[in-house]
Image (cartoon, rainbow, N blue to C red):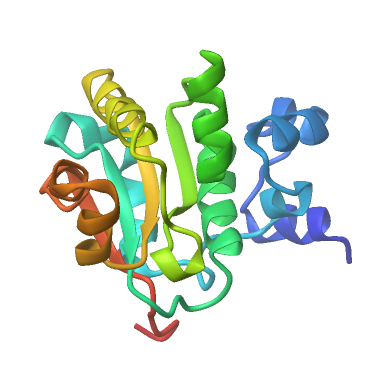
Amino acid sequence: MSALAEALESGLLHTERHAALLRNVDRVSRQANIPPYMLYRSMVGVCSKEEVDYIRALRRQADAGIFGLVVHGPRPSGPLMDRFGAIAAACLRNYINARLMTLQSVLEALDEGDFPRPTVLLVPNFYVGVKSGGKLAEWEIPKLLGMLYDRQSAGLQTVLYVQDFAGLSLAYGQACEQHTNSAHFVKAKAAFNNND
């Protein structure tokens, strides 16, 4: 059975409700920067309970003063691209504009003045530690923090991976750590047990 047939049989996708999405799978997935097969997979089992709950309440999050989700911790359960892709796909199935971008792509778009404004922006390598290449040029930090502030001001959601908040503070500055570690972001541990 194909992945699409399984998604339809399980009720993850519905022929009528998702007709526009199914007609444009390649374009939609390309724009979101995720592989098309992600649209046919549930985020349950790939993501933590906190991540699933966050997405289930996504349309109400800004009203509650929540403007994003931070997945944090040094040893993630499974590839972060799979988790963040599953979150993006869940948004797309609910007709919420989502886009997965690397930190490098974010900085490039900010430099070019061509930054997209998806309802949900996902950055799976927002801070991966200095040893893993998590060092930014000093002049890039204010632009990155400004982008986070702008998204919050606009009521948009931002999903980030942060290896550790102390390292983030040292590398990106205290203001960036305070913003992402505030009550405005739901926190989900990077390592989780699928049986939780």
The reply, left or right, for residue 189 in relation to residue 177 is: right
User: Residue 92: x, y in percent?
Assistant: 58, 37
Q: Name the residue nearer the viewer: 67 or 23.
A: 67
- Residue in view at x 43 percent, y 80 percent: 75
* Outermost residue, front side: 138
Residue 193 figure quarter: bottom left
Instruction: Identify which residue, 41 or 82, lies in the foreground.
Output: 82
Residue at point 14%, 41% (across, down) = 175
Question: Relative to 147, does residue 64 appear above or below in the rendering?
Answer: below
Q: Residue at x 39, y 79 (%)?
A: 191
The quarter in which the N terminus is drawn is bottom right
- Left/right placement of residue 186 relative to residue 194 reads left
Q: Nearer the viewer, residue 105 or 123?
A: 105
**Closer to us: 182 or 138:** 138
Residue 2 as seen in the image, left or right of residue 61: right
User: Where is residue 161 drawn, in percent x and y?
Assistant: 40, 57
Q: Position of residue 177 (x, y in %)?
A: 19, 50
Tally of numbered discs: 0
Q: Is residue 62 visible?
A: yes
Q: Is residue 196 above or below residue 43?
A: below
Drawn side of residue 3 relative to residue 86, left or right: right
For the C terminus, which image quadrant? bottom left
Tell me, yes or no, if residue 98 can be seen here. Answer: no
In the image, farthest residue toward the top: 113
